[in-house]
Image (cartoon, grey):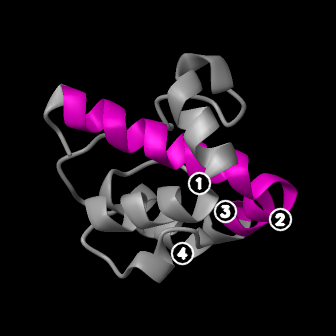
Amino acid sequence: MAVTNQPGKFEASNFQTGLLDVCDDCGTCCYGLLCFPCMGCSIARDMNECCLCGLTPTMRSVYRTKYNIKGSLCRDLLIYQCCMVCAVCQLKRDIDRRKEQGIF
């Protein structure tokens, strides 16, 4: 029998908002557009990482792994190549929602 998922406390899922769901949280979208580096630092701070790491596809991959979110590093790289701001805003929205739910 092949193991396809890492054991953990989270069921396999998707991000809680879509990549282009800017209307779900206009404040986060504006924050990402107007002060992109600041949002990266905010994400890194939330994840207890170096400020320079918040805007990288690897940070998204680490987050996905921690919360068992479906995807791959290759897909993360592709998403960042197409729309880095959308990818970072999606990550920030998910972090904020998990904080509200008490599971971050």
Q: Using the image, tell me which numbered label, if any, was put on residue 81.
A: 2
Quick check: is 87 in the magenta stretch? yes
The residue type indicated by label 4 comes to: Thr
Apparent side of residue 85 relative to residue 15 in the rendered image (left or right): right
Apparent side of residue 20 relative to residue 28 in the rendered image (left or right): right
Does the CB distance between marks 3 and 2 fall below 8 Å? no
- Numbered disc 2: secondary structure: helix
Alpha carbon distance from label 1 to label 3: 7 Å
Q: Position of residue 13 (x, y in %)?
A: 44, 37
Q: Which residue is mark 4?
A: 58
Q: Position of residue 88 (x, y in %)?
A: 59, 53
Dot 4 or dot 2: first in sequence order is 4
- Residue that sits furthest to the right in the current view: 82
Q: Which residue is mark 3?
A: 76
- The residue that appears at 52% across and 35% down in the rendered structure is 28
Dot 2 or dot 1: first in sequence order is 1
The residue type indicated by label 1 comes to: Gly
- Numbered disc 3: secondary structure: helix
- The residue that appears at 50% across and 37% down in the rendered structure is 14
Does the CB distance between marks 4 and 3 fall below 8 Å? yes
Dot 4 or dot 3: first in sequence order is 4
Does the CB distance between marks 1 and 3 fall below 8 Å? yes
Q: Using the image, tell me which numbered label, if any, was put on residue 71.
A: 1
